[in-house]
Each structure stands twice: as C-alpha cells, then as structure tokens.
Amino acid sequence: MTTIRRFCCDDLLRFSSVNLDHLTETFNMSFYMTYMARWPDYFHAAVSPGDRVMGYIMGKVEGQGESWHGHVTAVSVATEFRRQKLAKKLMNLLEEISDKMDKAYFVDLFVRASNMPAIRMYEKLGYVVYRRVLRYYSGEEDGLDMRKALSQDVEKKSIIPLKRPITPDELEYD
Amino acid sequence: MASKFGLAGGIPERRVRPIWDAVDSRQYKAALKLCTALLAKHPTSPYVLALKGLILERMGKPDEALSVCLNAKEQLYSDNIFHFDDLTLSTLQIVFQRLERLDLATSCYEYACTKYPNNLELMMGLFNCYVREYSYVKQQQTAIKMYKTVGEERFLLWAICSIQLQVHFSIGGEKLLPLAEALLKKHITSHSLHEPEALALYISILEQQSKYDAALEVLSGDLGSLMGREEDKLRLQGRLLAQACKYTAASEIYQKILESCPDDWESFLHYLGCLLEHDVNLPKSRTSEHPSSLPVDSALALKTSLSDELVESRLASALSFVQKLQVNDTSDCVRGPHLASIEIERQRCRSGNPTDRKFIEALINYFHRFGHLSCAASDVEIYLHMLSSDETTELLDTISRSFDASSLSVKGLGLAITTFKVQELLGTFFSKSTTELQHIAKGMVEAFYKNLPLSRDLDPQESMHGEELLCMASSILVQLFWRTRNLGYLIEAILVLEFGLTVRKYVWQYKVMLVHLYSYLGALPLAHRWYVTLEVKNILLESALHHILPQMLNSPLLQQTADLVKDYLKFMDDHLKESADLTCLAYRHRTYSKVIEFVQFKERLQHSMQYLSVRSDSIILSLKQKAESLDEVESILENVNHGARLVELSNEDNVKRFTFNEDLQARPWWTPTTSVNFLSEPFDEGSTPACFRAKACEHKSTEKDDSKIKYAERKALLPRLVYLSMHGCASSLRETQLNGSGLDTDATEMKPLLLKYARSIGYSIDDALSVILGMSSGKKSVKDFTPDIVSWMSFAVFINAWNLWSNESVVPRADESSPSSWQIVDSLVKICVEEQLIDANRILTSPGNNIPVLVQMITEPISWHLVVIQSCVRSMAPQGKKKKKGGPSERPNVPRLQAIQRSVQCMIDTLRSVQSWLSDQMRPEEQALDILLSYLQGGNEDGPGQISCILEENSARHNPELGERIAQSLETWSSAGVVRRIVGAEKELLVELKKICDSKLKLLASVSASLSSALH
C-alpha cells in the first residue's frame, strides 16, 4: 500500500530515511527544484500508510527526433521498504509517462559499472546496456548507459548496443 | 549571451565574447583587463559598465561593483542612450541581485518598461524582478499587461498565479478569487485552455470557492482531456465529488481508481470514507510537520451519521470489493487490499461489532502473507495498539509458528524480526524482567551472526539480511541501562552497533544510534565522527542536523561546532537567495502548481525555528571563541549590526510563524526530541508499555512547545545584550562621557531587552531579580532553577552591566551592606560552578554528566562577564590610542575598581577550581580502559558482559560459511579497541575544556595586574 504521487517540496524535509543511505546522493536545492519545475510528471514519491516517504524517482524528458527520450536521474527506496518491487513500480510509472504522455522513443539511465545489484535490477526491468561511458563518474569510474525501448520505437532501434565505449564529452546531454 | 544580430548590448559581439569566455572560465583578471580596454572605447556604454560590475563582483569587490553598476544605471537613464536592451538589463540585474540590491534591478526594469512600453522581453524581465521581490500585486499587474499586449494563455496564468499567491499570503487575498475565475472564464470562452497545469489552476480556483459542481463540470467537459493520466483525473474527480457530498458517485470513482491502482492507500481511505459518508475535507495536509497521530486515525475518526445496518452493509460491500482485488493480485507485492481488510474490520469493531475475531484474523492473515517484509510491523502499527494482551500473545505465537527458527532462510529471518518489531512497537519489552531482556538481546545478536551466511553473496553495498536485529538488541541494552544504571549495558549497546558497522560500514541506522549514545556517554568526538560519515548536506541539514547540533553547542568543541553551523547557514542563506529564481523557472516552464509550492516552501524555510536559532548560535559561538579579545568581540558584533537584526527576528509576529522542520522519525526511542532524554530521568518501574508510548508521542507532538521557542527567543537577545553591556560599561566609566547621548539610548534599550529575557525564563523582571538575589545569597537553592541555570547566570551578568550605567537603581539595596551587583554575579557564579563540581562521580563512569552545563557556564555567562570586565578596564586605562588628546586626566573610580578587582579574583578562583577538578578527572589511558572494561567482566550470569563475549567469540571463530569478505571484516573487530576510543574521546573533551579555562585564566591574570597597578 503505497500512494504514488507527485513529489513536492515538503517531501524534501521528510526523505532523510531514503537519503541517509550512502548510495543516495542528496543534491542541492536548485537541482531538485529544477526537476520539479520543469518535469513535474517525472518526479514522484511513494508514501506509506503512516505517511512516510518510502522512496522516490526523479527524471526528465529530453532529446530530439528519434532520440526524444525519458531519463531516470535517480530512483531510491528506503531500506525498510526494499525487496517489495517498489523501484519497479516507480520505474514503470516513469516509463508509462514517457511512453503515453510524451511519446518518447526510449527511457535511459546511467549506472556505475560496479553497481551490480542495480544493473541486475534494471536488466530485470527490461533495460539493456546500450553503451559504456568511460570514466563518467568523477572522472574515475565507468558508467553504463542502459536503455529500454518504448512503443514509439517499433523496430527497437534505440537499444541496439554501440560497439565501442564513448567518453563523457561525446554524450548528447548532461 | 550574444544577440543574433551580431551586437551585444550595442557592442559588436566579437568584442564581448572574449570577456564572457574569460568570466566563464573564472579568469577574472583577464576579463577585467579586456573589459577596461573595451570601456575606453565605449566609456558610456551601460552594457560594458554592467559587465565590469559583474567582473568586479565576482572578484569579491562588492563596493566597486556597486558603484560601476550605479554608473551604468545612470547612463541608462540619460537621454543620449541609443541602445536599450534586455541583455544590458539582465546583466545589471545579475550583479544587483548578487549585491542584494534587488530594488535597483527592479527600478532599472521599471524605467525601461515606461520608456519602451509593449516590449515583451522587458516586461518579462520586470515580472521576474517582482517575483524575486515577492511583490505579488505588481506581478499580477505586469502579467495582465503582457496578456493584454500579446493575448497569450501563459501570461494570463502568470497573473492567476500571482492572485493565488495573494490569496495564500495576504490578508483578504481570497477576495480576488472571483476576479481570477472571471478572467479565466473569459479567456476559455474565446481561446480555451491548452495546458494541464492551467486546468489544474482553474480547478483549484473553483475549489477554493467551494464551487465543486462547476469544477466537476469543467473536468468532465472538453478541458478534462488535458489531464495526462486517467488516474490523476479520477483522483481529482473523487475529491471534488466527496467535497460536494456526492458520496455514492465519489465512492464509485475511488473504486475505479483502486481497480487500476489497488495499492493506492490514500484512495482506499477516501473510498471507505465516502462509503461511510464522512469524507468531507479528508485530503490531508502535507504541510503538517509532525503528524502526531497516523493519518488513518485522524482521517477516520469522524463518526458516520449512517444507521448501523447501513454501515454494516456498506462495509460488507467494501470487504467483498477488496477481497476481489486480493484475488486479482498474484504478485504478492500489493499490500493495499490486504491492509484494507484490516481497516474494514476495525471500522466494524468501531461501529458496534467488537466481539467477533475477524479483526485479529485479518491481522494474522496480513502477517501470514507479508510478515517477512521489513515494513510489516510498522504497516499495521496503529492496529497493533488495538489488540488486547491476550490477542497480542496469540498473534506473536501464530507468527512464530509460521517459520522454522532452526533453518536458515531469508523469509524465516524476516518473520523472526517482525515478531521482535511487533513487541518493540507495543513496548512489551518494558514489562519484561531484566533477565528476560538480556536473554532476548542475546538471542538477537546470535540470530544476526547465525544468519550472516545468507548475505555472503550480496554486494558489499547492499543491505544485509537481519541488520535490524542489532538495532533492536542495542535498543534493549539501552533500556537495561536505564533500568539498572549499570554502565556495562550502555557500553554493550555501543559495542553491538560498532560490531555491525565492522561487518558493513554503511548502515546509517547504526550510525544515528551511535551518535546519540556517544553523545549521552560524554564521548562527543566519536558521535561527531559518526555523524560526519552520514554526509548530511543540503536540505538534509534542515531535517537531520538535530541529531548532533544541540550536543555540540554545549560542548567545548567550538571549532567543529562552528563548522556545522557555518555549513547549515550557508545552505539556508544560499537557498533563500536563489529560491525566487527557481520560482521564475517554474513560471517560465508553466508549472503553476510549483510556483505556489515554491513560495510556500520558501516561507516555511524562512521561518524555520532552527534557522533563527542557529543564526543566534553562530554569533554566540564566534563570541565564545573570541571572548578573550575585546577587539575581536567588537568586530564580530559590528559585522552583525550589533545583534539588532536578531532581536527584530525574535519579535512575536515572527515567533508565531515558526516552522519545525526536523525529521524526528529516526531519533531513538529514549530521546524522541532534542529537549528530551529519558535516560536522564529515573526509570519508572510502574510505567506500562502503553503509557511509555504515550509519553514518547506526547513529546513528539509538543515539539513545538513553549520552552523551546522561549529558549530560541532568549538566544536571539544575547548578542545584543552582550553588545549593550560592553558598550554601556565602557562609556559609563568614563566620567567625561557621562552625559553622552549614546548612553541614554543604550539604557532605554537595555531595559526592555532584559524584561523580555526574564519573561522568556518565565519571570517578571522583579521576580527574576529576586531569584538571582536569592540564589547568590544562598537563600534560594540553585537546584530549583537547574534547567535554566545558565540563563540565570547570564541574566545576572547583564543586570550588573546595566546597573553600572543606569540612572535608576536596578538592584534594590537595602543598605550599604547589601551586596553590590558585582558581588551578586561573583557569588552566583561561584555557587553555580561549585554545585557542578561537588558531584564526586567520575566523568568516565557517569554518562549524562554535567560537563555540558559546566562548559556553558564557562563559555557563556563567565565569558560575558569577562567581556564586561575587559571593557570596564579598557575604558579606565588611559593609555594607547584610547587616550584623549589634551583631555582632562581621568580619575579612577576607586570603589568600582576594587569591585572589579574582587570579581576578577573570584573568577580566577572559580576557574582554578574547575581546572583542578578536570585534572583530577583525567586518568592514564590504561587505567581508564581497565575501569570501563571491568563493567563487562562481571562474570555474573545476570549482568552485562555476555553479549560482548558473543561478539568477541564470533569474530574470532573461523566460519567458512560466511564467505571471505564478511570473515575478513570480522577479523578486525575488537571490543577493547572501541572502549579505548571512548576513553580517548572523553579525555579529548576534558582537555578542550581545560584549554578554554587556561585562556580565560591568562586573560584574568593580565587584567588583575593592570587593575593592581591602577589601584596602587
């Protein structure tokens, strides 16, 4: 029993049990608020019956032509609410919005190449490694660009893996 | 930055680009050089001037930047200006904003808009200026003008948003709602609406006027198709129907939502509410900072007006509906419909069918299905509290029977943890004997170790199975300490968590508990170290700083505390400065709902009690750090306009609007809020689990209580009081200045501040005076005033300062033999400090000790008193630059000098006694280590020590099932190592405090010497 609704500013004051986790980055305010202001439909919180923030997803939609796509910037679930497919629900919501509302071609995300648990989860959700971005994380660790095609991309062109890794300056978007 | 016509602000773009490139790459010197060269060619170009201002501001030269920009502004206003564009204005705006002169930016745009009416770009610039200044009316006017100029939907909605802001933030603003509605209606008739956010705004305008039917009509008409997601539309429809009391229709809508989103708990509550016809105003406010009871409680507390039969039949239909949902779901991840059954049974009990067993059966079913989940117990927390003790036992037995404790499985472990959690939530551990509790805690630690192999193949970043067990074990050990006061338990509580962090270093729950345990134990440096590893930053500072800051503020770790405070204030200040820019962004992207939300959020942060409090703390801390140098104290105060701004901020209007944004959820049970620590109170054997829970809840809900607010108010007065005290003393002792006009203003200001100060402790000024008189003469017991003792001492210090230069007699003196105000301070300080030193207990072995109080006494009232003394002495010493040229020679006021001399001596004696006490507390490390370890070596079946043995044995044992990684981390475990760190941390605190005493004594010695020479 999860109520999934738009993320609001007040949630920022109640998401410490999600964000104290070491893998969850606490961004600066303009980051969160820019997402809320520009892509309010891509920023959702899941709350429990006790009105606690169980987790949230933030993302955006960007690109042009056939690279018009949804992007998952962060998805995080508090320890207490893990292992019940909440991240999946949140991801599905973002995919649905990208697909149905914004008619995007695919959804993508970046993940640390070493973060096997996350990579496995995304694979289970239907994402494939599209390409490797060399030294994407603070110029040290490689990132994997993972993608999932949406219904617009009938031939699933967007997810044909690139043969060679790219460098961060070759990325189309920040 | 360049315009598309090759001109930027009237200057060829190729000349400007290199300057911007240099600015962007932070090559400010190079930028300035280029800019100066360009300025030589275009000396009156407002754009180039603005650029120069921008560069100067970035270089940290605000005054020069301002003057250059003012020049640019002048040029703009002059008649011979041939180029006037938004680029120039927006560049100027950036600089003015950074210089905190929004008004100047606004006036530039206002001027431009008058000069070039109908220029949309300039009007948008002006609109943004008003957004930054939070001028809602002007925002509205500008937006309407833009709307009239170009007729675009977005500008109308900017105006509507500006009206909404007035509705929310100005008195009587709701009168504007009909205007907003009419504007929208007119626009819709001719142009319709095209944005989902515009529709939402329109609906909310109708909703705010209780025009639910009209709103529903809009929603079901053509405009309704603007809503992107069907569920969102249905939710809105359901809410409007419920508000319009159309319960049947509303419940049908909610039923539809639940069919597509069966896990949507909020919608289920609405559904049930509508069935029982009391869903009015159900949408709960998300702004409530600390929901005192769980929302389901308050949401369904309303009594239905339906007959019992009708209720029963509706509940029955609800039940069959959720049962259908249960059957449809095969994923085992949708808990909503199952929880719904419990809620329906609870409603049945409420409406007069309390006897049947369906409620407990629903609960048992829930655990049967979801009991292995980490959140199972907290999901049903409110329902658990409704069980009788027999039912609780039955529930626990049933869960326990549902798994095999002897075999290893994730699910079985989850269920075992849930049984513990249920007991923890119900507080049943409080009614168990100490032996039983020890046994349980031991079982938890053993279970943790036994189940470690389940996690052997997990990624080191992933949370391991059973991590909660150590939190619960530690929690029980704390309770055992509370009951028995046996320090061994407290040390074990720490060891268990440290052990957990040795196994996996990322568990924040362990860290938070350790922060509190180390703080309580007096090993604050360790608490601080763990806190730092939590990487609390940005907005988390507002919600999670409370875990460490209050303790740090009362510690001698002044520098670390100053760093915490600095980070927090930087975050808040920066955010409040940039917040309006983000509102502009929301306007630009037409996310109207967020425009309002952002402004509300800014208000919430701006009125944060913590924010005001920490602003005071920050100044007080700097004063504490520099109290031994009068010049530094003066310059600190000068930088904060002598504390006057803080006094303003603590006025009643502001205080009433305080918000409390701390997230208290993660605090451990024994300290539910920053001002409460059960461990400092005696354990009440008679207290039942229920009353314990009630107590904790009560503390959380009264977090906004008076005493905290009063304390914050009091702190806000301090810097000003210190300033007035030193300023007044300095002038009063100079006979030549006795008639100075400044003095009178100070005197008239001091009195109301002291009145307010006394009132914040809960006394009138006369009563407060008699309290300090009473305490200093020994007629009143210091103990009776313990919680505010430091404030009382400071009060006495300020009274003395005031008395020195006030025309009225502040302290009533019966005759010459009554104590002077100096003597009152001396004796109060002496008595209060001595009181702290009497306690013969060793700091090492007495947690919750009096070090924090002692630190405050020394760093606050004694420091303020020393500032007063220093400023008296300086004003009497006619040497150096203070000497007046050719003025009359100043004659020392001998009786007063003698009083000061006696006070100095008293402070010296007092601080020396503190020092010798501190030295006495410090022991050789090995000796201290032995003392602490001895608490764990009782050898007694029934005391602490058993769990630390288990930890030691487990880590030493070679268990191949654990896998290499876990086994390796265990090898590094050492209980003695942890205890050694505790000893080190406690000593570190004592050493720091001693250093503070040292520097004060050094100052006093020099003051004493100069006084002696003045007297003889």
Image (cartoon, coloured by chain):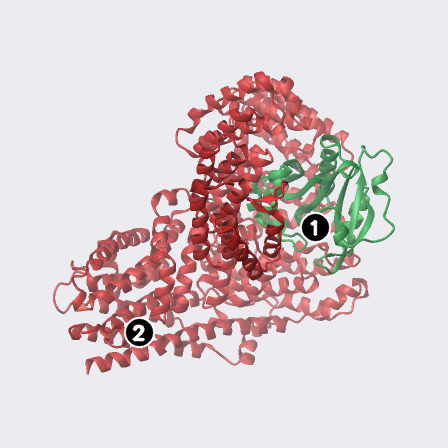
Return the chain for callout 1: B
A173 left or right of B593 in image = right
Element assignment for label 1: helix
Q: Is residue B391 visible?
A: no
Please give the name of the residue rendered at 50% of the width and 57% of the height, measured from the top-left corner. B56
B63 left or right of B515 in image = left
Within 10 Å of disc 2 (Cα), the crowding (few <14, some 14-19, many 20+) is many
Task: Indicate whether B514 appears above or below B915.
Answer: above
Q: Position of residue B326 (x, y in %)?
A: 73, 31
B358 left or right of B680 in image = right
Along the line of sight, the residue nearer the viewer: B26 or B497: B26
Along the line of sight, the residue nearer the viewer: B546 or B979: B546
Along the line of sight, the residue nearer the viewer: B296 or B1004: B1004
Amino acid type, callout 1: Ala
Within 10 Å of disc 1 (Cα), the crowding (few <14, some 14-19, many 20+) is many
Quadrant including the C terminus of chain B: bottom left
- Residue tagged by mark 1? B416
Tint applied to chain A in the drawing: green
Q: Position of residue B967 (x, y in %)?
A: 76, 66
Please give the name of the residue rendered at 33% of the width and 74% of the height, measured from the top-left corner. B910
Amino acid type, callout 2: Met
Element assignment for label 2: helix
Answer whether labels 1 and 2 touch (C-beta < 8 Å): no
Please give the name of the residue rendered at 57% of the width and 29% of the height, measured from the top-left corner. B154
Label drawn at residue B907:
2
Q: Nearer the viewer, mark 1 or mark 2?
A: 2
Tint applied to chain B in the drawing: red
Q: Position of residue B420 (x, y in %)?
A: 64, 50
Q: Quadrant of residue B938?
A: bottom right
Q: Quadrant of residue A66?
A: top right
Task: Indicate whether B757 appears above or below A92.
Answer: below
